Amino acid sequence: MNTKIYVLHFSKETSDQPMISALVRKYDVDFNILKATILQGNDGLMVLELKGHKKNVQDALSSLKSQGVTVDSISTIIRRDDALCFQCGACTGVCPTKALYLKRPEMTVLFDPDKCTGCGLCIAVCPVKAMQVDVNEDIGLLS
Amino acid sequence: MASPQFIVEKTYDEINARIKAGEAVVVTAEEMVNIVKEMGAVEAARKVDVVTTGTFAPMCSSGVFINFGHTNPTIKASEVTINNVNAYAGIAAVDVYLGVAEVAQGDPLNKVYPGSFSYGGGHVIEDLVAGKTVTIKAKAYGTDCYPATEGGKEICLADMPFAMLTNPRNCYQNYNCAINLSKKTIYTYMGTLMPNGKNANYCSAGTLSPLFNDPLYKTIGLGTRIFLGGGIGYVISHGTQHKPSAPRAENDTPTRPAGTLMLQGDLKKMSSRFLKGISMQGYGTSLAVGVGIPIPILNEEMAAYTGVADEDLKTKVVDYSYDYSHGVARDYGEVSYAQLKTGEIEVNGKKVTTSPLSSIVMAREIAETLKQWIESGDFLIEKPIQTLPTE
């Protein structure tokens, strides 16, 4: 099973289409809507967790893209500024998916964006604010 | 002269002569672990002249004495801010002390809980060493010799007449492993602690930590030359809250917070790589300070001391939701730094995730840097004028 969180942008032409229910019927994926909103200009934004067999998830995403929906993995929105990070490791205790982890025995702090679910806990605990949300893509994760 | 107490005996002069000749054998405290394990303390003492240590972690009792230079007309500055952070000005005209835990004016602090404390004295210090210009604003009541009642300047570190990093309490010799046994998340200087003992935070460089390698302060004292914030500094005293009487293990290392150091060094020679302003959510601002102390291997006792590994170094687990803040001496067992570094310990029979606040990667870099300084012949080992109190 594959679980990942995606940020979907719907253009105003597509934001009134029942696309998510179509996904469930066609591709046998589970979904969990973490956030959904209509933005200015009537385009839409949705933060969606998709769970299913890898191929089904990929096909579901391809289908969305073919209908003009922009799909980003949430991990591309949370990033680490490596110049700021001083490798303390404070984030590793709060990260629920071990996307932030210590490589032992060196005790280097590593970030694996593929495992990041975008919960944002690391952003608040990082003492030098090395974990950041892309400003242009801030979708109110922490609100 | 008394008969030799040790099989190997070296003097500071002999070690320094070897450093000057480029012949000194210098290793880091991490490297020393295996050397002592393989050849024993006596042979290790014959082979190794100096062991370098390092640590890089938040050290809240830090700050800088600044003289920002006179204005025209002159001012007996009595209220001073630097980048909107209050500096203590109750000393002579245009002298101030800026502490790292001072939060910028107007910060909502914990009124919006947990506060984010985005800028404070530690950040000002980092900005200064990074070469940035800061804004100083001063107010005064005016005297005949210092008539100005208001003044200020935009100034960078290079243009300040004097800036001396002076830290009343650094380099804690061991520290608590913090846990939260209450039902709600708490925000402490030991980081964010989740409820029901879900995680535990610790803060020591373990085997690399300076005072773990000279547990009874036999070579560290007033006048010891050290690596401080990327430049050269000195130990100028034992630090505030220095508590040498803490319980100790058989290898003489304390199993609780014990000794501390007061440190000083010229800020102008330091680097923002080794001084980083930090914000602890819900707690406040601080400064992560890089410190490295060289330990001369005068005899096999010092070789044995510097050979300690993470498994030989222990601390206790302390509950920060109630016990710490109410002086309750209950403890939840001792754990070694080797256990802590695995990322998991056991408390009350439950597995608890551990995470560090002290950067081992930076500590190692500091120990390596100090090693290179000594190997290049530029950095000599200073014999302390007075060693630190041991009781």
Image: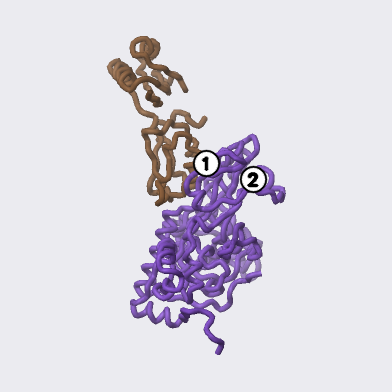
Chain colours: A brown, B purple
Using the rendered image of the protein, determine whether residue B307 is visible from the camera's viewpoint: yes
Q: Which residue is more in the foreground, B314 or B39?
A: B39
The disc placed on residue B161 is: none
Labels 1 and 2 in the same subunit: yes
> Which residue in the protein does label 1 denote?
B353
| Residues packed near mark 2 inside 10 Å, few (<14), some (14 to 19) or many (20 plus) | many
Q: Which residue is more in the foreground, B307 or B54?
A: B307
Q: Is residue A81 above or below residue B386?
A: above
Name the residue: 59% across, 43% down.
B347
Query: Label 1 to label 2, Cα distance in Å?
Result: 15 Å
Which amino acid, mark 1? Thr
Residue B87 position, x and y percent, is 59, 58
Mark 2 falls within which chain? B
SS label for mark 2: strand
Left or right relative to B76: residue B162: left
Q: Which residue is more in the foreground, B272 or B288?
A: B288
Residue B95 position, x and y percent, is 57, 66
Mark 1 falls within which chain? B
